Amino acid sequence: MEIGINDQQRYYNDYWSDHSYRLNGHEIIRLAKILQGIACVVETIGKTELKICDLGCGRGWLSNELSKFGPVVGVDLSETGIAAAKERWPSVDFRVADITQWRPDETFDLVVSSEVVEHVPDQSGFSNTIRYLLREGGYLILTTPNGKVKKAWDKGGHGAQLVEQWLSPKELRSLFSDVTPIMYCTFMYDFAYHGIFRITSAPKLLRLISMLGIMPFYNAARNIMNMGLYQIIVGRYKLPC
């Protein structure tokens, strides 16, 4: 069944109506990775103030964090989420829009989108919006769940949103093929205890690896195998020839 924009808006108006503003553990971990990505962008371009768009900003907490690095426009389909964000963080420019169709009269140095693309039916339209929003040579920071491990996540009985279209690392690179990565990794490896994760995330094994002081090397190996629950891409849109 096709899920229309009105269905999505109704769903997210209800979804954000009673959502806590306190960050959960997963959000804190993702925020740390996003901040690492911003450091990469700032170091690459040598510019400490950025004009930023938080695309699919939900309840607005990430927009507020991003405002430490320059003016931010937070955009989301949910009127409820945006109204609450405006009340809580009035210094941030929050707007209601369909993020696959939004075409403002401004461009940005950086677009950040965290845990959004997997909930968008029209992922190509979402990618086109990002391309439109960025100035020539602008940067993208995007986090999304790793489709390669979705089966293990689903076995944990976690709740699902209206649309769940997780991208594998290969699919993510294909969707953003016009982005030159300056950082990519998967992260958060010990999220399940099913299948191969019964071995790789076994508590006794993790304790031993920690005691030996080789956890960074173990995580590096798991990253090479794309075993993290989340993935992040930080990159620059390719300049026209």
Image (spheres, rainbow, N blue to C red):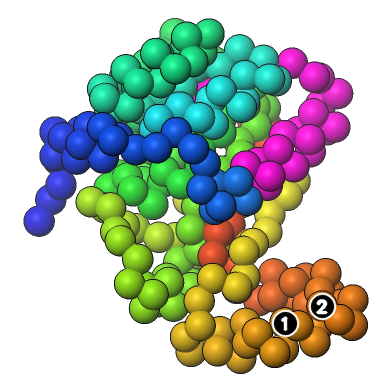
- Residue that mark 2 sits on: 210
Rendering coords of residue 109 (x, y %)? 64, 21
Residue 214 vs residue 129, the one in the foreground: 214
Q: Secondary structure at mark 1?
A: helix
Give SS at disc 2: helix
The quadrant holding residue 157 is: bottom left
Above or below, 200 against 30 in this view is below
The structure residue drawn at horizontal position 61% and vertical position 12%, both measured from the top left corner, is 71
Residue 206, label in figure: 1
In magenta stretch: residue 156 = no
User: What's drawn in magenta, residue-wise?
Assistant: 30-56
Q: State the image coordinates of residue 174 (x, y, percent, origin top left).
A: 51, 55
Q: Quadrant of residue 39?
A: top right
Residue at left offset 53%, top offset 8%: 91
Q: Position of residue 29 (x, y in %)?
A: 63, 51
Q: Position of residue 55 (x, y in %)?
A: 45, 30
Please, which residue is most extreme toward the left here? 1
Q: Quadrant of the C terminus?
A: top right
